[in-house]
Image (tube, coloured by chain):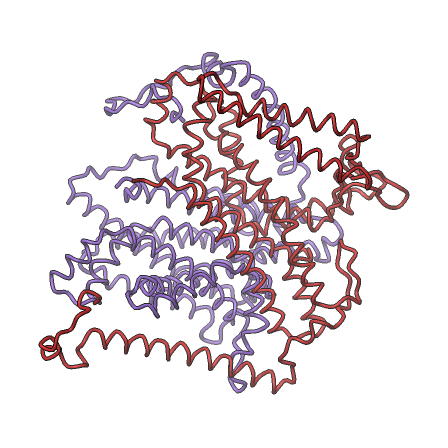
Amino acid sequence: MTTTDPATRTSEPAATPPSGGPTGMAWVRENLFPDVWNSLLTLTLGPLLAWGVYALGRFLFVTGRWEIITVNLTTLMVGRFPRDQLFRLWIAIAILAVVIGLALGVANSVARAAAVESGDDYHRPWHEPIRRFGPPVTLLIVMGVFVRTATPLLLLAAALGLAAVAYRLGRMIPIRRRGQVNLVVILGVIGAQLAITGFDGVPRSVWGGLLLTIYFTVGALLFAFPLGVAVALGRRSSLPVVRGTCMVYIEFFRGMPLVVLLFTGWLVLPFFLPPQFPTPDIVTRAMVILVLFTSAYVAEIVRGGLQGLPRGQREAAQALGLSPWKQTRLIILPQALRSVIPALVGQAISLFKDTTLVLAVGLTELLQVARIIPGQEDFRGQGLFAETLIFVSLIYWVGSYWMSRESQRLEAKLGVGER
Amino acid sequence: MSASTETSPSDRAHRPPFWRDVRIIRIALQVGFLVAVGALLFWLFDNLTVNLRVLGIRRDFGFLDQPTGVPILGSDFRAQSPIRDALLVGLYNILRVAVPGILTALVIGTLVGVGRLSTNWLVRRAAGIYVEVLRNVPPLVMLIFFYIAVLQQLPAQADSITAGPFALLNVRGVYLPSIQLSAGPAPVFFGVLGLALVAAIVLGVLRTRRFDATGQPHRRVPLGVLLFLGIATLGWLALGRPLGLQLPVIEGRGVDGGYRMIPEQAAVFIALVLYTSSFIAEIVRGSIQAVAKGQTEASNALGLSGLQRLRFVVLPQALRIATPSAGNEFLNLTKNVSLGVFVAYPELLRIGRQAVGNGFPAPQLLFIVSAGYLALSLGISLFTNLANRRLQLSER
């Protein structure tokens, strides 16, 4: 962290990186004991931190009774999902691995092409993937510790292998065909869900654990994004009635706590449907609420992007004689959305964390599993909540920390802050 | 469209046919939109009334006067009191966590945020870990962790954990010192405090005038504080110590005196303060870094000390940048008090939910709960907007 030291901030790029700086005792003196005040800080904070690290390490490696995780790893991942149907899940994972690999490959070749066009040197240091994928790999290793048989690990490795192959394939697809690739990705996502629920499969009401958490995150995002963009466009409309309605929509859903909305969806939503109408199941109700809630936030983010666009863009599009719809679709939206991608990732992170709230309506997502399993017969009365809750915290932490780091990377790449 | 307010007869002749006239299309579109939205809302409301009639659920708010039937945790609310009062207690319980929570999160967040920019490696790293760990874990996970895995595992009352004579910690709650007023001289003492405040302000004004006239350092803040504290102490002693700390003491099977936070409240408070303070820390850090570098360099060139630079140059500008986002975090904390429902903290949602469980109509109750939270949210965002407007630069 050299931000506080103006001396190291030179404007000209150094040919070779400055080597290390002070080392050994000099470093300690400079960074820990530069003056009386800082020495005092170091001496009080140091022992406290050391004690904290010691206590945590002792719990993690000595006193913690982690067999509860080993026994329940499958439950934490999928909840009450029938164990003889797990192969469906693996099929879904394989399909998703292929389409995600394909999409990433195409995205990579697009980025390369753009870099070549703008004359940038598209070069990545060899250690970048290690830094980027550190958190999820750590999580996988932790999971590996708790796995009882090698099958899941082998299957996961196979899925990753599929993804890698698809990535290579994706990079070979010509850029002008990427519209078709988007279609394939959407079909793949639908196919993955069908592989689980279709063909006498497992209904969503018995899904649980991490599966349900991811399902809610991805599903709510997929639906909330188009709805949010539509509301944002309405919020910027020149028609007062449309603008006002969209404003009320946004302010209402942003002003309400999600838990209150979920309870409302659970207890009251069925009242708003005709009596002869079949009551939608709880997963659908929770999903509807998550979509409405998230779309209001997406709308507010996209509105920011729309407002940040210079007026001349719209005027130039008008001058070209494009119809209003084409102006929006071809000129305005691509630029506005590009500038708010990091904020949208931030929204995805908060949605991922907010899915914990669906336990309000009695769904057993990841957190609820962690709350239930210490009450199992084998573990009852032993108070193993700390173990299970810390384990799921790790999953949530890796998920959102990784996403936020990727979004910072993206932000730097898009140069959003530097206009 | 507003450019052509005058329409001469010749214009009128050249108007396009009405189905291509922009003004008419706009009106038609809006009417169509209004009709569609109105129809949707009407359909929903109609379904609601039909359903309630079919199920025999009452459709008015008369039930608010009926007895609640259950007492409320951590308050002297009685089961016979009407639901109306129970909901008010719920609203009060939101504020009981939100107000001290916002203040505490602001203090911790500011310290951590400044800590992230410290020159001390250890402080910088510790603050960084604090932020990165806490803001990436869902607040509900923290809440449940503190409630089940920490507060409920505390020792029983007899073996309470104590922090000197000041605080007690056991499975029944967190006990802190409270301020005790003696009935007689306390109002007089508040009068003395008011007097001291006036005196301090007068002193400040006088010092400022002198500063304007002579240019000598005014030191109005330290002098004013000193005067205030002096008068307050004298008055406190003269009136026979009307204001005192009451410490929690274990008395038989209960705890006497002090302020008791039930475990549910303590868990909500701790979890939300930790979660929100990590976001406030990021806002503070970002705002300080966003103050243009030239400002720091200019104050160095003026020969200001490090503290002066922060106090007079950097912080006032950082505050201006931070206000909207910080207001947003205060709003989030207030809304997140609703997570208390998961640990049975009796805030508004929990009380509404409990009443639904006792057979009172769900639509009306959730309407009231929603209205309560919505009113709090809109109030806070209004307040933030006002503060923001006052702080904004009025350039030219």
Residue A21: horizontal and vertical position, in percent? Answer: 38, 17
Which chain does the purple colour mark? Answer: A
Q: Is residue B62 above or below residue B102?
A: below
* Residue A307 visible from this viewpoint: yes
Front residue of B273 and B32: B32
Who is closer to the viewer here, A172 or A285?
A285
Q: Position of residue A2 (x, y in %)?
A: 38, 25
Is residue A91 in view? no
Which one is nearer the viewer's eye here, B371 or B354?
B371
Q: Nearer the viewer, residue A248 or A295?
A: A248
Choose top left, top right, bottom left or bottom right for residue B5: bottom left
Q: Is residue B197 left or right of residue B280?
A: right
Q: Quadrant of the N terminus of chain B?
A: bottom left
The residue drawn where x is 40% and y is 53% is A158
On the image, which quarter does residue A96 sit in?
A: bottom left
Compared with A353, A51 (above or below) is above
Residue B108 drawn above or below residue A404: above
Q: Horizontal placement of B191 versus A362: left or right?
A: right
Residue at the spot 28% in from the left edge and 44% down from the top edge: A414
Extreme-top residue of the structure: A25
**Outermost right residue:** B252
Q: Which chain is rendered red in the image?
A: B
Residue at the location (25% across, 22% down)? A14
Residue at 28 percent of width and 50 percent of height: A308
Q: Quadrant of the C terminus of chain B?
A: top left
